[in-house]
Image (cartoon, grey):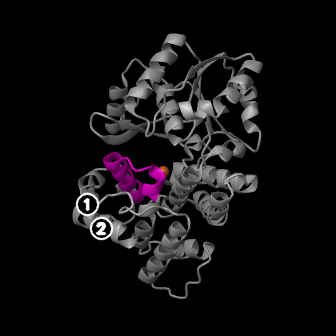
Amino acid sequence: MVRRYTQLCPVAFGTGAVSTTGEVGKELGLKKVLVVTDENIEQLGHSQKVIDSLTEAGIQTVLFNRCEMDAPDYTVQAGADLAKNEGVDGIIGIGGGSVLDSAKGISVLATNNITVAELLDCSKKMMPVENPPLKIILIPTTSGTGSESTIIAVISDTKNHEKTGTMAPPTFAIVDPELALTMPKEVTVYTGMDAFSHACEALTSIQPNPHSDILCYDSIERITKWLPIAAKDLNNLEARENLALASNNAGIAFNDAMVHLGHATAHSMGAAFHIPHGICCALVTPVMLELTASVYPEKVKKIGEIMGLTINSSDSKEIGLQVADNIRQFMKQLDIPTLKDLEISKEQIGSCTNYVANEGLRFLCPVQVTEEQISELLGQIYDGYQ
Ligand SMILES: [Fe+2]
């Protein structure tokens, strides 16, 4: 079978890379940019580093610091309005996944005479927008989303309580592991498990390719080794470098291979209960791998082996069970909360069935499930990790 794989955008990777933002902006011919971030990142001084680098390169900056968790549509609209009023020719997003996704949405709206509601509607109908987006440089401060190297922007439709989105290719990604040193333990762990789930789902979707497989296995290996180390020693730069690379690699991988049922389910849980995305991803991954082991037994076995498991069985069901159990132990080691800890009942989780059934990503799972099976899977997510 012929598979395509893409190199979406150049990446500047390494400690200190953020100080090259101005240089990159100059290469891209930018004159005046909107720096998109949130208040936390601004307080940590990260956005100022970007502004200083851009200013030094002679590029004018306008700050937009109103991004919020889960990239609500109204913040994307507010950022786009500011970008248009200021007449910027580029967008710089610096922050976690929600900031980077907001920046992507802003880059599309800034060049098109439509509202954010119309943009999200276009995406649902798979209709392209008229004009290409502004040039955009993305700088992650967490190691999980991979958004700096994907075309996808997840945006929250706050009227309909849905996670939806748009497509916006980054022009350039700047990955500086030093920025991740300020992440607290919980964010480190949750975002790390988001990257882990990207790798697991990209390996087991309906459209993996040889390139994405390599990146995914590498990402799983780095996260297994370095996430527990980073969780215990937040200032460990070697751990941060490995996790930043794992996250970026998983992002490049799933930009092609895509994520599937796991993320469809994670999105439903995030939209219904506002649980951080990385926790949702961690909770769904064991169940998702158990399911897809029937199609990809060798791949799921390899995930287990990379994590240090010895699997003697060649039975796909047994492989799925062992690997799922091993991931749950890994999650316990990292203090990932259970749904009970989050005060969410089994019945409440069951109420996500309809959302998952209507989430497009689920069709990229190689095992097509009925609504009844989705309900059972949601029950397994609850029961399997206590
Ligand atoms: Fe994710």
Decide if residue 381 is on the left or right side of residue 233: left
What crowding class fits label 1: few (fewer than 14 Cα within 10 Å), some (14-19), or many (20 or more)? Answer: some
197 shown above or below 90: below
Crowding at dot 2, Cα within 10 Å, few <14 / some 14-19 / many 20+, comes out as some
Q: Amino acid at mark 2?
A: Gly
For the residue pair 300 and 211, the one nearer the viewer reads as: 300
Most common SS among magenta residues = helix
Q: Which residues are magenta?
A: 259-281
SS category of the residue bearing label 1: helix
Q: Position of residue 183 (x, y in %)?
A: 61, 46
Q: Which residue is mark 1?
A: 350
Locate residue 126, reporting x and y percent: 36, 37
Q: Which residue is mark 2?
A: 379
Image spot of residue 30 (x, y percent): 66, 20
Q: State the residue in front, 346 or 353.
A: 346
Q: Amino acid at mark 1?
A: Gly
Do the residues under discs 1 and 2 have CB atoms within 8 angstroms?
A: yes
